[in-house]
Amino acid sequence: MSHGAREHMSEKLVIIGNGMAPGRMLEHLFEQAPGRYQVTIFNAEPRVNYDRIMLSPVLSGEKSFEEIVIHCDGWYTKNGVTLYKGHRIVAIDRAAKTVTSDRCVTEPYDRLVIATGSVPFIIPVPGSSLPGVFTYRDLDDVNAMLLAAQSRAKAVVIGGGLLGLEAAAGLNARGMDVTVLHVMPTLMERQLDPAAGYLLQTAVEERGIKVMTQANTMAIVGDGQVEGVELADGTVVPATLVVMAVGIRPSAGLAKEAGIAVNRGIVVDAGMRTSDASIFALGECAEVNGQVYGLVAPLYEMARVAARQLSGDESAAFVHSDTPTKLKVTGIELFSLGDFADGQDRQELVLRDAAGGVYKRLVLKDDRIIGTVLFGETADGAWFNDLKKRRVDISELRDNLIFGQAYQGALPDDAQICGCNGLFIALDALAARAA
Amino acid sequence: MNEARMVKTTCPYCGVGCGVLAEVGADGSVSVRGDPNHPANFGRLCSKGSALAETIGLEGRLLHPEIGARGASWDEALDLVAQRFSTVLAEHGPESVAFYVSGQLLTEDYYLANKLMKGFIGTANIDTNSRLCMASSVAGHRRAFGADIVPGTYEDLELADLVVLVGSNLAWCHPVLYQRIVAAKEKRPEMKLVVIDPRRTMTSDIADLHLAIRPDGDVALFAGLLAWLARSGLLDRDFIAAHTSGLEDARAAAEELSPADTAAVTGLTEAELRAFYELFAHTERTVTVFSQGVNQSISGTDKVNAIINCHLATGRIGRPGMGPFSVTGQPNAMGGREVGGLANMLAAHMEIGNGAHRERVQRFWNAPTIAARPGLKAVDMFRAVADGRIKALWIMATNPVDSMPDADRVREAIAACPFVVVSDISAETDTIRHAHVKLPAAGWGEKDGTVTNSERRISRQRPFLDAPGEARPDWWIICEVAKRMGFRAAFAYASAAEIFAEHAALSGFENDGERGFDIGAYGGINEASYEEMEPFQWPVRADEIEVALSPDTPFSAAARRGEMSGRTKGGALRFFADGRFFTADHKARFIAVRPTPQRETDAEFPLILNTGRVRDHWHTMTRTGKSPRLSQHSAEPFVELNPEDAARFGIGDADIVRLASRHGEMLARALLTERQRRGSAFVPMHWTDEFSARARVDALVAPVTDPISGQPASKTMPVRAERFAARMFGFAVLRAKPGLIDADYWGLARCRGGWRLELAWAAEHEDWQVFARSLLGNEPTADLLAYHDAANGRHRFVSITCGRLAGALYLARAPLAVFRNWLVEQLADDQAHSRLALLAGRPGKGQADHGAIVCSCFGVGASQIAAAVGDGCATVEAIGATLQAGTNCGSCCAEINTIIAANRLAAAE
C-alpha cells in the first residue's frame, strides 16, 4: 500500500484560478487526501486567495485588504502548493494534458480544475470604454475606484442589485456624491418583493445616495473622460466615475477554446466533472443542471463535491439549495431566500413596520417555507433557512413563526385565552395534573 | 395652600360597612386604608375598598343638570321636576308617581325620599334596589321576630364553633367578614365552616364541608334539619316553651319530607345531610350566615324562616357565637330598612297597615297626608310604568335597566314613561340615557351622612372632596323638589345632621320599647356631635346615653364604646338575649315552611341560570369599572359552565356563548369548570351596555318574585346555552377609550394606562386594517405595524404614537392565546417597547407573563404565585413576604391558598 501511496503522490493537480471556491476545495482535499496531489495554481490576479465577498467593506474603508485574506503565502508553502501569481492561462492542451500561461509557463496535469470565475457584464452602449468607467469584481477594481474617488466627486452606479448597492454604499462612505441607476421599478427585484425593495430604496436614500429606478442607460457620455450617463428619456446624469454593476457572465472562454462542452458556463455533471473526465470545473464559471451560481454557499458546495471526487469518492454529488442573499451595507439588514412569487398554492405571512423599517415575508407551500424576505431585522434568517432546507412542517410554529426563534415555545399552561379570570381553569388544571 | 388631611369615613360597597381612612395629600391626591379602630373591619379592607381612590376621578361623572340633551341650571331643572310631578299628581292622583331609590343612598337621603313620598305626595310607591337584595330577609325577620332585626354581631362569627354559610360566597362578596372568620379559624382550628352553595366557590375551598346543594334546595335542607333535631330529641324545650310559638306546625310541615325526600330535593346524599345535621346539632355555638343565595329566590322568605326555625328550636339566638345572620349586599340596605324606605314599610320600623302608626308618623312629620296602603314593589312598580299607570318616575342612585329582572322590558318601560328623572353620579348608565331630567348627585367622598351595616352599626360617611361641577347631595335635591312642590316647611333642612336628628327622634318617638329600632338618644344631635359621631350599633334609646346638644361637649367623649348599658366589651349588643321578641305576645314564631317546587328546566331551556358577583366588581360597575386594578380580575362577561354541559351544547373553552331565556338573551365568554354544578350556569350580574355588547344578564331573568317579600328570583332562571358561531375573535389594548365598537361581541375593561377589549364577530370584516385604524385611532402621526396570515385569518396591528403604544389589536379565528397581562403592562409602561414583541402579542424569550391576576392590590398573577410555591413558599405568609401578594386587602388569600394546595398536591405526586 505504501507503494500505491507514493504513486498517488506523483499525481499532478493543476488549478486555473485562485478564488474562494478552489481555495475551499483545497482545504477539503488536504484534509481528506493529504499528500495525494502535487498542486499547482495559476492565478490571473497577482495575489493570494481572499474573501471577495468582503470587498465592499474594503471599498467603504471599514476593512483593509489584509483583513480579508483567506490564505496567506505561508499556507501555500506549508501545503506544497506552487502558486503562479499574475499568470493567466491562455491555453489548455487536453491531448498533452498541459496548460500554458500568458507568461509562457507550461504545466502538465493529471487532473485539471477550471475555476476561472466570472466577468462583469458591460452594457454595450456608446462610451462604455471611456476612462472612468469601472466594473466591480476584484481588488484591482476596488483600488482603481478608490484612486479615482480621490479626485472625482460624482459617481453613478449602474445597477441596483446586490453588487451595485454595495459599490454605491462604499463610494458614498468615501465621500462621493452617488446616484444609483436601476432599470427595474424596484431595487434588487430578483431577491426582494416590491415592498421590501421600496423599504430598501428608502434606507439607501436615507444614507444620501440618490436612486433612480426605471432608468434605462442609453450611453455614457464624455469627451475622452466620463462626464455623465444619458438615459432613455434624454436625461443626462452628471458623473465623473461610473460603476457598471449590472451582472456577471461565467468566464468559460478558455474551456470553450479547449473543446470542453460549454453552455452558459462550463457544463459539469453533479460530480463537477466536465465533458473531459480529467477536467473539473467549479465556481461561477461552472454550470450544473443548467444553472450557474454567483453566491458563495453553492460555490462552497461545489468545492466540497470536487474535493470528494478528487479524493476518490465518485459518489459525491452537488445538491442544489437556495441560498440566502445578504446585503453587506452597514446598517441595512436584508435577507432574501428562495421563491417568493405569488401563487394559488401559496400562503404568506407578512409583517410590516414601516416606521421601524422592518418588513418580513414568509412564503409557505404545504406548510413549509419556500421563500423568505427579511428587511430591517434579519437575525432569524439562518433559522428560516434551516427550516426551509429541512422542509420542516411549520404548522405548530406558524402563529409566531415570522417573529423568529425568540418567540417560539408553547404558551404556559395558564396563558389566558379570554379576559375572564382564568384562575379556576389554572387551578383545575393543576389539580388534574396532580390526580 | 391645602394641607394634607385625613378623614374617617365608611366604604360605599357591601353591607360589611368597613371604616375607611381617606388621606388627602397637600397636592389633592387621595389614598385610602382601613380604619384600624372601626369595629367592622379593624383596619382591613377588601380589594374593592382598597381601590376606592381609583374610582373617584371625574371621568364619566354627571357634573351639571340636564334637561333632554341640553345643560340646564339647577333652578330650571328642579322647577321642571316639581312642576311635572305636581301636574301628574293633580291630574292622575298619587298612585301615578313613583320613586325608585337605592341602598347606595345615605340614610338621610333615604329618609327624605320616604318622607316626601309617604307623607307629602301621599303614596307608598317608593321602592328600592334593596328589594332585589334582602327583602326576603326583612320578611323572614318580621315573620319570626315581629320586626326586621338582625340579632347578632360580627363578633359572633369569631366566637362561633360552627359557621354555616348559606348562599353566600363570603370570600368574594363580603371579604372582610370572610377574613375575620379565617383568622378566627386559624386561632381555633377546631372551628368548623360549612358552605352550602350549588357552586364550588372560593369560599368553599376553605370549608370543612361543602354541600353542593341543588338550586333552591335550602328550605328542604333546613326543614330536614328541624325534623332531624326533633326526631333526635335535640330541641331546646325550655326556650321553645318560654319564648316561641308555632313549633308543632313547623315540625309537622318539616316531617312531611322523609330523609330520602330531603336528599332528593337537595340533591345531596343522606350521608352528606347527616354529616351536616350532626355538626349543627352538636355545636352549640353556631352562626348561620345567609345572603343572596337565600334571598333572591321564589322561596326566599321561607328559606330565611327555615333557617331561623332551626336556631329557635335550639335556642341559639341572641347569645355569643350563635344566631341566624343575614348579611346584606349593599352599604345602606339596612339604613333604608330603618327609615322604612320600601313600599311595604312606613318609617322607623312602623307598619303601613297599622292606623296608629300611620297617625303617629303623620303627626310627627306634621304631614298633610300619609300613605294608607303598601305601594308597588320594584317588579310591580316597573310593570306599572310599562302599562302607563306610573306617569312620573324618579330614579335615584341605581341602574334598574341593568339590575331589574326582565331588564329589556324595564328598559322599554322607562323609555316609554312620560317623565323620568334620574339622580346619579354617572353621566352614562344604561338607565340615565332614558332620563328626561338628569340631576348630578354628589358621590362617595363628597357626600355627608350615615350608613348602617349588617350588624346594625351606624357609621358616618364623611366628605373629603369638594363636590365637582354642580353636583349636590341627594338630600338637598329632594328638599329642593319638595319645596317647589309646596312642602317648604317640612323640607327646610340646612344639613345632613338635622335630618339625622329628625330620623333618630322619630325612631324614639312614642316608642317605649315597642320597636326594636330606636336611636332616640341621637334625636337632638347637633352639627358638632354629628361631625364627631363614632360608629355605634342600635338600639341606643334616649335614656341610655346623653348625646350632646351643644358643641362644647363632643359626643365622642360621652359615647365611648363600652360605656353604653347592655353592651359587651367592644360595643356589641345582641337582640333577643332576653327572649323577648317584637310580636304582640313577645314570642318568636316558628313558621311552617314546605319546599316550593323548584324551577323546572325543559328541552328548550335545559340549564338553571344563577346570577351573582365577582370578587372585584360591584353592582353595575359604575364605580369599580373605573378602577384599573379591579377590572383585571374579570375583564369580560363570562358564563361558568360544567364541562359536561358545555360538551353537550358544543361549547368549547373560551367560546362565546349565547344564553337565552323566554325573556331575553345575552353573549358571554365560556369558562368551563368542574366547580359549576352540572345542569346549571353562572353569570355575573355586573356587565352593562357600557362595558359589553350584550351581557345584561337580567334581561334573561323572569320577573318572578317571592310571594311574600316581592324579591325577584334572580338565581334560578331556566335558560339555553349555545355556541355563538364566531368567525373571528379579537383582543385589543387601547390607550384611549374606544367610541362605537363595530363587533357582535365585546367586553371592555379599564386597565392601567388605558383599556382592554375582548371582541368577537359572526362574520369577517372585508378589510381588517380598516377596522384596526378605526379602533386604534386614525391620528396621522400614528404608525401602524401589521402582521397578516390571511390564509389562517390571523391579523395583528400595533399603533404607536410619539414612541408610545397607542393601541394593539390581535385577531384570530379561534379564541386568542395572547399574553394579555403582559400587553396590558406594555400599555402602562412608558419605556421603549420592543415593537415586534408588541406585534407578536407576547414577550420574547426570558420574559414571562404573570398569568391571571390573583392579587389586585399588587398585580400579582397565578403563574408568579405557583412559581413561588415551587421555590418553597408553603404558606400565604411566605407568598406575601416574597411577592407581597395578599398582604394588603387579603381578598385573594383564598385563591393563594388554593394555588398552594394545588401545587403541593402536584408536587406530592
Image (cartoon, coloured by chain):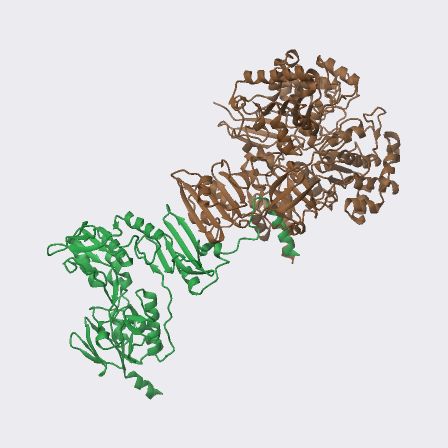
Q: Tally the marks.
A: 0
- B250 shown above or below A295: above
Q: The N terminus of chain A lies in which quarter of the figure? A: bottom left
Q: Residue B443's image quarter?
A: top right
Q: Depth check: give the residue in front, B28 or B830.
A: B830
Residue B188 at x, y percent in the picture:
73, 42
Residue B335 visible (yes or no): no
Q: Depth check: give the residue in front, B16 or B370.
A: B370
Q: The C terminus of chain A lies in which quarter of the figure? A: bottom right
Q: Which chain is brown?
A: B
Residue B288 visible (yes or no): yes
Residue B32 at x, y percent in the picture:
57, 32
Q: Quick check: B136 left or right of A250?
A: right
Residue B236 at x, y percent in the picture:
86, 36
Q: Residue B95's image quarter?
A: top right
Residue positioned most to the left: A224
Colour chain A appears in: green
Q: Residue B150's image quarter?
A: top right
Residue B807 at x, y percent in the picture:
46, 41
Q: Quick check: A369 left or right of B323?
A: left
Q: Quick check: A45 left or right of B703?
A: left
Q: Quick check: B908 left or right of B346?
A: left
- B35 shown above or below A210: above
Q: Depth check: give the residue in front, B726 or A278.
A: B726
- B34 shown above or below B63: below
